[in-house]
Image (cartoon, rainbow, N blue to C red):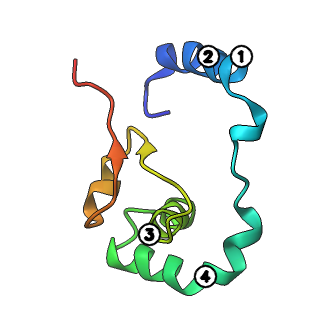
Amino acid sequence: ERRRDAELVPVLERLRSGLPRDAIRWTAALLPGFLDPIFEVVLATQGRLNFNDAFLVVLQREGLIGPLATFDAAFDLVDGFERIAPPVH
């Protein structure tokens, strides 16, 4: 994503081979209960975070996920959001 094509394949290969399937938390079923807070995050960030990203913010606020590993600095617009950013080269 975002012009980091060279990094994508090695990362996906590590995830595919090393991530236990039971370590994945499936959250789609929770979505209907969080529609209003999701819309609030999208509005508060003036659309810099899309619906899916806002869902991640809400999940973290609810304690359902921990820090998020992402290149997307738009998450930094949300006070208290825990983002694991890649190292700066």
Q: Check disc 2 and give the amino acid type.
A: Arg
Side (left or right) of 80 relative to 51: left
Looking at marks 4 and 2 on the same chain, the residue that comes earlier in the sequence is marked by 2
Q: Looking at the rendered structure, which numbered label has been put on residue 35?
A: 4
**Residue at image mark 1:** 17
| Residue drawn 39% across the image and 80% down it | 43
Mark 4 packing: few (<14 Cα in 10 Å), some, or many (20+)?
some
Mark 1 packing: few (<14 Cα in 10 Å), some, or many (20+)?
few
Q: Looking at the rendered structure, which numbered label has been put on residue 74?
A: none
| In this view, the mark in front (4 or 3) | 3
Mark 2 falls on what kind of element?
Answer: helix
Quarter of the image for the C terminus: give it: top left
Q: Position of residue 36 (x, y in %)?
A: 55, 87
- Residue 12: quarter of image: top right
Side (left or right) of 23 relative to 78: right
- Residue 76: quarter of image: bottom left
| In this view, the mark in front (4 or 2) | 2
Q: Position of residue 32 (x, y in %)?
A: 71, 80
Q: Check disc 3 and give the amino acid type.
A: Arg
Mark 4 falls on what kind of element?
Answer: helix
Mark 3 falls on what kind of element?
Answer: helix
Q: Check disc 1 and give the amino acid type.
A: Ser
**Residue at image mark 3:** 61
Q: For the residues marked 1 and 3, what is the alpha-carbon distance in whole angstroms?
A: 30 Å
Q: Are marks 2 and 1 in contact (CB under 8 Å)?
A: yes
